[in-house]
Structures are given as C-alpha cells and as structure tokens.
Amino acid sequence: LERSLVIIKPDGYRRGLTGEVLRRIEAKGYTIAKLQVTEATRDQLDAHYAEHEGKPFYEPLVEFMSSGPIVVAVIEGNDCIKGFRSLAGATNPTEAAPGSIRGDLGRDWGLKVQQNIVHGSDSTESAEREIAIWF
Ligand code: GTP
Ligand code: MG
C-alpha cells in the first residue's frame, strides 16, 4: 500500500482551504491515515527541502513555510503519490490545469516564492523520508 506525505501550506491554511483539499483527497478515494495541524521548525524545513538548498527561492520558501500553521497528512492508496500530484497540478498555479487544486484555487500573488497551497511527495523514497520528518 503506497503512502504519500501531503502538506497544506500556510497560504492554504490561512485561506480556509483545508477542508476543500481534504475533501478532494477523500473524494478521489485515498485514505487519510495521519493528520496534524502544526508549525514547521527550521530544522524540519531544512530537512524537507534539502534538494532545493542554495536555489534563489530557498530562503523565501522556508520563510513562507514558517509564516503560519500548516496541515500535515499521510495519505494512502494504490499509486497515491502520482495520483495526488495529479490532483495538485503543476507547481506554478498560473499554469496548473483547471480541475486541479492549484489550478482551481491558486494564482500568482507577485511574491518571491510560488504560494501553491499544497505539497505532495514525488517518489516512494521521498515519501518515506518526509513522513519521518513530520511524524
Ligand atoms: P512541492 O509539492 O511543494 O514539493 O511542489 P513541487 O514538487 O511541485 O515543486 P518543487 O519541489 O520543485 O519546489 C518546492 C516548492 O518551491 C514549490 O512548491 C514552490 O513553492 C517553490 N518553487 C519551486 N520552484 C520555484 C521557482 O522556480 N520559483 C519560485 N519562486 N518558487 C519555486
Ligand atoms: Mg517537490
């Protein structure tokens, strides 16, 4: 049974989109196995986003992810990693297809980092690594 780590980022939480995102995950048929509202620590974010360290958007990204509560979830279901990334849509919400979370609910806010509502793991290795960081 595949697992993925999903985060509702501070913009999603602030905008009251937690229920809408969880609704889409459940409507798709995935199980919410773990769920928590928390505030990310610097150590958690450095570990979670290690692959992006040094990129121009890294500090803005960590700052943004520290700007308020987030919702962290483990979801389960066959091929849910690919399936959730499809539900989420493209990284850039302007380009994300309508029908996806980012395409329907996100936009460009003119900021230094793309505020795109959700995170989803991109491989089974990242999923297990990320779940260990947050749970
Ligand atoms: P996540 O599910 O959040 O990991 O998104 P992703 O896998 O679609 O994107 P990626 O892992 O490449 O980047 C992580 C996050 O960094 C993104 O979700 C954005 O918030 C931000 N980001 C990534 N690429 C860019 C970029 O080119 N410019 C800016 N400003 N932000 C970016
Ligand atoms: Mg990613």
Image (tube, helix red, strand yellow):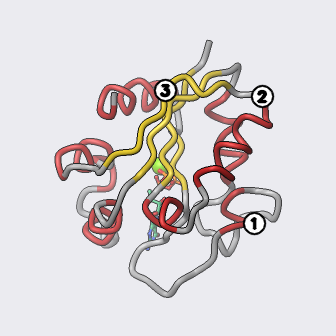
Residue displayed at 41% across by 24% down: 128
What residue is disc 1 on? 104
- Label 2 is placed on what type of residue? Gly
In the figure, is residue 33 to the left or right of 49? right
Q: Nearer the viewer, residue 134 or 15?
A: 15
Q: Which mark is residue 34?
A: 3
In the figure, is residue 27 to the left or right of 129? right
Q: State whether label 1 is within 8 Å of ligand 1.
A: no
Check the image and report above or below for 70 versus 106. Answer: above
Q: Residues within 10 Å of mark 2 (few under 14, many from 20)?
A: few
Residue displayed at 66% across by 40% down: 84
SS at circle 1: helix
Q: Marks 3 and 2, Cα distance to the nearest angstrom?
A: 15 Å
SS at circle 2: loop
Q: Which mark is residue 70?
A: none
- Label 1 is placed on what type of residue? Asp
Where, by quadrant of the figure, is residue 66 drawn?
A: bottom left
Give the mark nearest the N terminus, 2 or 1: 2
Q: Marks 2 and 1, Cα distance to the nearest angstrom?
A: 20 Å
User: CB of mark 1 within 8 Å of CB of mark 3?
Assistant: no
Q: Which mark is residue 29?
A: 2
In the figure, is residue 61 to the left or right of 11? left
Give the mark nearest the N terminus, 1 or 3: 3
User: CB of mark 3 within 8 Å of CB of mark 2?
Assistant: no
